Amino acid sequence: MAAIHRTTMTPTKLELITGWLPKQSWYPGTAGKPDLVRAGGFRLDDPEGAVGIEFMVVVDSAGPEPVAYLVPLGYRGAALEGVPDEALIGTSEHGVLGTRWVYDGAHDPVVLAQLSALLRGEADPQHQSLSGTPDPTVTVHGAATGQDRGMDTRIQRVLRQAEAEQGPSGRLVAGWTWPDGRAARGVFATVTPQ
């Protein structure tokens, strides 16, 4: 089980994401700098205990309407080999663990393996900021069956509020909060046979 340390990160996760987000092909924002706030998310445990895994929701209020993004993160104690350069969001100094390499979880094999395990009903979502605390608000509708082979997992980067209880099976549903305090829920990821 991952321990959440009450300490500092320099630069912060939001600072790293603010510089990285506008460079992504799926970012529909303006050419200006995003105005991000943390809006929700959850964690997963790495069975080996080496990689921190967080699914963070950030809301960008820089445009005419706020936009919610899902940013899966992999925190590592060393550089990850064999991934494209753009997979690295940045490095940060953690007050307890030292230098952390922060990766876009869509390129981190440990993050993707645990997301697949969650979608199969074989992993439990954890509270974003409390150690050892399950998050019952994160649900999987119609857990996928079978091995990772032959399954296509898709992360929903731009979140939309939706009637999450309806639709095909193999959907990861969770919530976030808009800047005005309204709660929202939607599909974070899906898995389908290839």
Image (cartoon, helix red, strand yellow):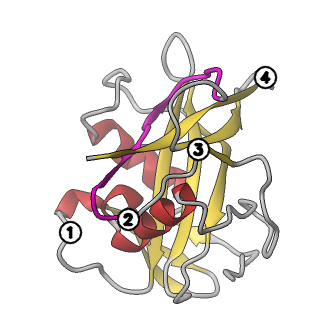
Real-space CA distance between mark 3 and mark 1, rounded to the nearest whole angstrom: 31 Å
Q: Residue furthest front?
A: 146
Can you identify the residue that label 1 sits on?
Answer: 83
What amino acid is at disc 4?
Arg
**Label 3 amino acid?**
Gly
Question: Is residue 159 rendered magenta in the image?
Answer: yes
Q: Which image quarter: residue 81?
A: bottom left
Q: Work out whether residue 119 or residue 40 is closer to the camera in this orientation and state it.
A: 119
Q: Which residues are magenta?
A: 148-164
3 or 4: tag closer to the N-terminus: 3
Are the residues at dot 2 and dot 1 in contact (C-beta closer than 8 Å)?
A: yes
- Write down the residue under mark 3: 142
Asked if the residues shown at circle 1 and circle 4 are in contact, with their CB atoms under 8 angstroms apart, the answer is no
- Element on which disc 3 rests: loop
What numbered label is drawn on residue 182? 4
Label 1: how many residues lie within 10 Å, few (<14), some (14-19) or many (20+)? few
